[in-house]
Image: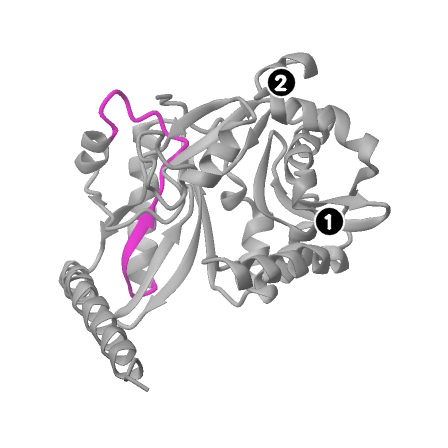
Amino acid sequence: MSAERLNEPSILQSPAWADFQRALGKRVFTGSGDGFSFLAIEEKTPLGSFLYVPFGPVAADTAGLRRSLDALAALAAAEHAHYVRVEPVNTDLGPRPDSTLEGLGLVKAPADVQPKLTWLVDLSQDEKAILGGMRSTSRGLYRNIRKKGVTFDTSTDPAEITVLLAFLHAVSERAAFRAQSDDYLARAAQTLMPAGSAKLFIARLDGEPIAAALSYDTDTTRVYAHAAADTAHRSLNAGIPLVVTMMMDAKATGRTRFDLWGVSAEDQPEHPWAGFSRFKRSFGGYEVEYPGSWDLPVNALMYRAYSMARGLREAAVPAVRYARATAATAARVVTRRPR
């Protein structure tokens, strides 16, 4: 498993992402200093607020990371936030990342916000090598699907996000899947596309859309962010050549990495993500593990209260599920009366 770290700030630490979060109505704070920078978003809970630093802060070494944590703690105190949640994916944390982070006063968050495992494809290779790393079925679909009347185009017109939204609605209606809200994706398109930080890819059959995907982009990395397809044309498997098209477009525009954004471990075949993780691995590439989400308590008393409340809530969930299942069973028994 790779211990690779991001060589540049994630899209989640970019000025364009700050603008997007503000468009969503969030309070966003940015800061920088000797060897570090950060973008922090205020998040609210019933017990108060905290600062969330997605895939950040950005710091090349632990000294810079320590200085960034000091700055974030001071900011949190000034804004009456109880803690700071960080995800230091840029910092070289050495052979024992958890020990390094604990030594900086951080506590492992109860759950990771962004994916701890991701799947990357190296776009610095030539096109033949990129295609050669894929499963033969993926490679064959990309090379031959145009013979079936399927074409691919790109858009940076925010109004065309409705193409993707329509497919996402259909997917969420037929499966246990909850897409981001229409407002979230529309604002992402409106904010990130004009900044050159997002792009829409559309597969068409005889001119009509049959699949779409939205990427988030930095100068070096394209992220496969949101995608869906029309089930009426499922047999064409247009989603596979659509992803390859996104890769080749990223390579043509000078990007060197394609981030398929979040996979489950290969030794967890029952994981809810197992199916689409196999899909993502079909494009070749390699797995990268990040440190995950960590908390910096600022108001120790309130952080303990938050931890206790979360623990009680999680303990209650199995009981609630049992009660619901029992009630559902009872309802089925009642309705099965002899005629």
**Residue 198, above or below 308:** above
x, y percent for residue 285: 51, 22
x, y percent for residue 26: 49, 64
Quadrant in the rendering for residue 171:
bottom right
Q: Which mark is residue 130?
A: 2
Could you tell me if residue 262 is visible in this image?
A: no
Viewer-side residue, 12 vs 161: 161
State which region is magenta. Answer: 79-97
Q: Residue furthest front?
A: 339
Q: Which mark is residue 280?
A: none
Identify the colour scheme used: one colour
User: Within the magenta stretch, is there residue 92?
Assistant: yes
Quadrant in the rendering for residue 166:
bottom right
SS assignment for the magenta stretch, majority = loop
x, y percent for residue 182: 60, 65
Left or right: 325 in relation to 121: left
**Mark 1, residue position:** 210
Under mark 2, the amino acid is Ile
Left or right: 7 in relation to 270: right
Residue, x 81% and y 38% (percent of image)? 151
Q: Could you tell me which quadrant the C terminus lies in? A: bottom left
Badge 1 or badge 2: first in the primary sequence: 2
- Mark 1 element type: strand
Could you tell me if residue 62 is visible in this image?
A: yes
Badge 1, how many Cα within 10 Å: few under 14, some, many 20+? many
User: Within the magenta stretch, is there residue 5?
Assistant: no
